[in-house]
Amino acid sequence: MLTIGLDIGSITTKIAVMNSKALIDAKVSFTGYNVEKAWRNILKETLDRLQLKESAVDRIVATGYGRSGVSIANETVTEIKCHAVGARFYMDNVASVIDIGGQDSKFIRIDKGGNVADFVMNDKCAAGTGRFLEVMARALEVDLTDFSKLSLQARKSSPISSMCTVFAESEVISLIAKGESRENIIAGINESIVNRLVSMIGRSKIEEPVVLTGGVAQNIGIQTALMKKLKIKIWVPETAQVNGAIGAAILARNI
Amino acid sequence: MSKNTPNIPGLGSFFLKNPGLFFKGMKNQLKQGVPMDLISLMGDYGKKTKKADASPTQLVANFTAGFPVEFLLAFDVWPGFPEFSACTAGMCEISQPLIEEAEGMGYSRDLCAYMKTAIGAREKGYPLDLGGSPVGDFYCGTNGVCDTHAKWFENEARKYGRPYFAMDVPCVVSGSDEARWKVDSDYIVAQLYDLIKFLEQQTGKKFDEAKFMNIINKSQECNRLYLEFFEYRKRIPAADYFIFMRVFMFPVFAQYDQDAAIKYYQKVLDKMKKRYAQAPEKIGKPEKYRLMWEGITLWYASDFYKDLEKKGAHIVYELYTESSAFRRKKTSSVEETMRQMAKEFTSATYILEQDKRIPFMVQKIDEYSIDGIILHANMSCRPSAAGLQDVKTEIEKRTNKPVLILTCDMMDPRAFSEAQVQNRIDAFIEMMEENRTQKEKQIMSGGTGQWQTINR
Ligand code: SF4
């Protein structure tokens, strides 16, 4: 059986191709303004690379904000459920998933039976998400990969207190003007994201093992700050960014 | 007492100046799907309010939710209800510019959006049908439900130079302190006697006990019939859902034409009796999930409720609509009625303290066969947003049903992000589905992946 999961996020589109046991391929591209173009392109490129025809695919499940725009999907499922299923693919006893996506950060609690027991998400504000990091990286003229590592060289973190992404950007600019080092500012930004995440998680109940997913999961500065603040061990799959698409592809097996 | 009420702008002149807004408002009102008899009952209130406002002799008093409106009726004072007007603007989906207008006057973003909508509509000269409300000849407010009411009306009365009667309900957290009850009750009853004196002064009439008791009897009957309808909502499929109930509650709230309200509720109940005597399951909509809603409705988002229903999720019980029924117990004298009112003011469902609210909700979850609970964290309404996290945790623990906290606003569409709300609702529905079928147990098996650990 060949299934595909398509996760159409606000910033990136992700695809995962699976057979009944394993992940065959996964890819990430930018969503842009045209959702249909985004998923059609990534689907075509992936199938071409695997030298497969669309007819070889048994089922497709779409997830993410743009899920309803995937006309060829057999079913649409929320990314909450997909991230839970995706995390279970790597760790069958996972109890908590923290997902930091482009405009959403979420915490998902999974019960012993593997079902979503509870979830909480950021509300009305993009602070604490991938979009926030992007804006900050731009203000500091650092690309996101360097951004991830630079905070580890910080001597201290410069606190960013503003709740609003735009005001936080002004705060960052005034810190630059004061001569604060980039590394310290980045550490401060990571800390502010983590503080928001931790207070969001406080509205539910975190239990181990904890898996971190989403595009921001690979950011080593965030990983470190999160573990420090929560005082627990956090697991990050190599395919953290496509975790939702993997979950969708797994769910596609059973619909 | 001389009357000096400026007229509410007419719909015709508003239409000539703002045809686009007029059509938008009317179209959105129509899409609510409110039955014709209820529309005409509410339309009648609008017509009579306009008439009272224009009349040189008819006094109009604006009152807030929770105020004992029966006293106004006993003095033939017309009850103006700005919160209802605000709801109308919400249903017309035109509340946002009104709220912004009020914010431009200095009202903060965090303040009650009912109040801001009503103030904005007045400032912008909106007709009654689109959110406007008359300036009262005097004002009657209470902090029984919320302190916003008291301050809102105090400001209005001062602005327009009108008398204001403020009824202070002690904040006893819904009767949690029984020892204080006698003192609190005396305190409220004394104020109700003051209210009678105040109304005598305003109207130049003497209080007529027999007339008042007649109004109270009708009010009790109205409330009884209204509450009886809830019994049919326990049935599967339920008699009706939230989008209907939020309008259905209006006659019991405003009490302006008690005979018409009683007749209407009786007619609806007769219909229900017949319907459930036959085969109800063949009549209603298929109910995949039965929901409870806590908090005020999203007035501007009728599509949201319709979408929920399309997904098979029906809101069959809300504390909010049930708490709009006040005179629940028969009384036979003015003093007894006042004592009973004091009891009701301090123990309304809407302001129940957590230790009573949570068991109350758990009981309703059982009675109404609820599959999931939505708690509306209302950004501009503190009383209805407080304590929801504790409610969620406790209800989940006691009932094992999924509880979703939805952060929006009753009246301000700026706090409603459709994509985000849909996402949460879809995930919530998935949880109810999982709860029911436990299907995912078989799906989610694995443990075969590669790992990178970062806590070395
Ligand atoms: S209870 Fe809420 S909606 Fe009612 S007046 Fe107070 S803040 Fe406004």
Image: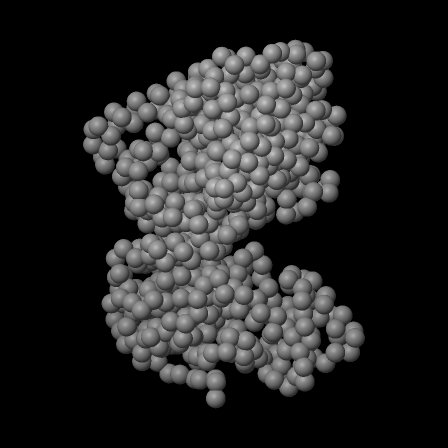
Q: Residue drawn at (65%, 21%), measured in percent from left and top?
A: B198
Q: Quadrant of residue A177?
A: bottom right
Q: Nearer the viewer, residue B190 or B278?
A: B190
Q: Where is B455 relative to A3, above or below? A: below
Q: Where does the image place residue B187, in percent across and percent down from the top left?
A: 58, 32
> Image point 46% across, 70% down: which residue?
A98
At horizontal 48% and vertical 56% (from top left) the residue drawn is B389
Does residue B246 appear left or right of residue A116 in this picture? right
Q: Residue at x 75, y 75 (%)?
A: A176
Query: How far across and how far down the image is residue A76, in percent?
Result: 37, 58
Residue A153 seen by the camera: yes
Q: Is residue B396 above or below residue A184?
A: above
Q: Quadrant of the N terminus of chain B?
A: top right
Q: Is residue B182 left or right of residue B61?
A: left
Single out the residue that lies furthest toward the right: A178
Q: Position of residue A144 (x, y in %)?
A: 59, 76
Name which quarter of the figure residue A253 lies in: bottom left
Q: Across the whole image, how many numbered discs are drawn on residues?
A: 0
Image coordinates of residue A85 in percent, x first then y, are 35, 68
B279 or B328, nearer to the observer: B328
The quarter holding residue B437 reads bottom left
Q: Say if B359 sits above or below B8 in the image.
A: below
* Image-based side of B233 in relation to A45, left or right: left
From the viewer's perspective, tell me whether residue A52 is left or right of residue B342. Answer: left
- Is residue B16 visible in the rendered image? The answer is no
Q: Is residue A142 above or below residue B305?
A: below
Q: How is the image coloured?
A: one colour
Of residue B20 and residue B407, the one placed in the foreground of this image is B407
Q: Of B327 and B245, which appears nearest the observer?
A: B327
